[in-house]
Image (cartoon, rainbow, N blue to C red):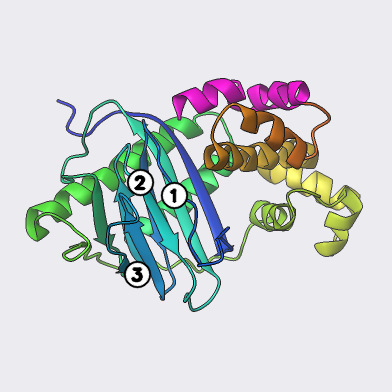
Amino acid sequence: MQIFPKVRHLNICWAPEFVPDIDENGWSIWGEHARNWVLEWELDEGITCQVNSEKDKPFGWSSQTWHVYAPGEKYRVNYRHRKRKHENLWILFGIDKPAIPGITGSFTVIQDPESRIANIVRHMYQVQQTGLLGHKELLRYQMQMIMAEVRCSSFSRGEGTAEKPFTFNPTGECARTQEPTLLEKVDSIITHDIYAPPSMEELASTLNMSVSSLSHRFKSETTWNIIQRVRWLRIQHAKKLLLKNGGYSSIKNTARKLGFSSPFYFSKVFKEITGISPREFLRLS
């Protein structure tokens, strides 16, 4: 018997020093996804959140907590008084059932003081970045691990709300101490200015490597070449822009913003990378 919902699709985003787009009052735009769940993590303090509408009272977002938004829930975050640039982890996912076991209502807060869930999601991001054969199956399995953690916590903690969140009690040290891989270093440099990615020469120079050494080692460790990686990262960023801006008119704007020669070429590359067109991606989201 299947206890947890089947994961239909998911996309993981990670920003080690998140810089949000905000208005003059510090608010991000309203987020809302009709068919997808959202799981978002904030590491910093001094952030407030608002759900449903502007009439609802904002509340403080505690450091090292997850917010879970059900499909259709509206939310926005205020960063005016945040303490520093901070890590942001974010998963957009669809499931084949209307609810996640252990979660009731359209909004839930989950504490994760030892980064147990965060470490799973960081690993999921790394798996997603590899794009290797079988990675989608592994990501779906890991997403069900997260749902299992939520379910187990609900038995002992009761319903999670903004005032009474779930709390995870992990055993053992989960902190990440590994040296960044070459893939992570390259990704960090490229995504630092995704609208104007560095040339091979600039990338190699930043990493204190020769172009030939960088190309050979990167290919050996990841099975990608640098150009393929740049295209893949640009399309991942394109997904964020499409979800943020919404509407089919955003396809043209996204193509232009990322420097594609035409919306047609952008759509062609998007489908090569994701298996679906930008229009299909928007429809499913």
- First in residue order: circle 3 vs circle 2: 2
Left or right: 150 with respect to 143? Answer: left
Q: Residue 14: x percent and y percent? A: 53, 54
Q: Secondary structure at mark 2?
A: loop
Residue in front for this viewpoint, 215 or 189: 189
Three-letter amino acid code at the position of disc 1: Trp
Q: Secondary structure at mark 1?
A: loop
Identify the residue position indicated by label 2 in the image.
74
Residue at mark 3 to residue at mark 2: CA–CA distance: 35 Å
Are dots 2 and 1 in contact, CB under 8 Å? yes
Closest to the camera, between mark 1 and mark 3, is 1
The part of the chain drawn in magenta is: 263-285
Dividing the picture into quadrants, the one containing residue 130 is: top right
Position of residue 78 relative to residue 284, above or below, is below
Identify the residue position indicated by label 1 in the image.
30
Closest to the camera, between mark 3 and mark 2, is 2
Q: Residue 213: x percent and y percent? A: 85, 51
Three-letter amino acid code at the position of disc 3: Glu
The stretch drawn in magenta includes residue 277: yes
Q: Secondary structure at mark 3?
A: loop
Identify the residue position indicated by label 3 in the image.
173
Q: Which residue lies at the image location 13% right of the left edge and 53% below the top edge?
A: 154
Left or right: 86 with respect to 58? Answer: right
Instruction: Count residues near mark 3 (Cα–Cα under 10 Å), then give few for <14, some for 14-19, many for 20+.
Output: few
Residue in front for this viewpoint, 203 or 256: 256
Instruction: Count residues near mark 1 (Cα–Cα under 10 Å), then give few for <14, some for 14-19, many for 20+.
Output: some
The stretch drawn in magenta includes residue 211: no
Three-letter amino acid code at the position of disc 2: Lys
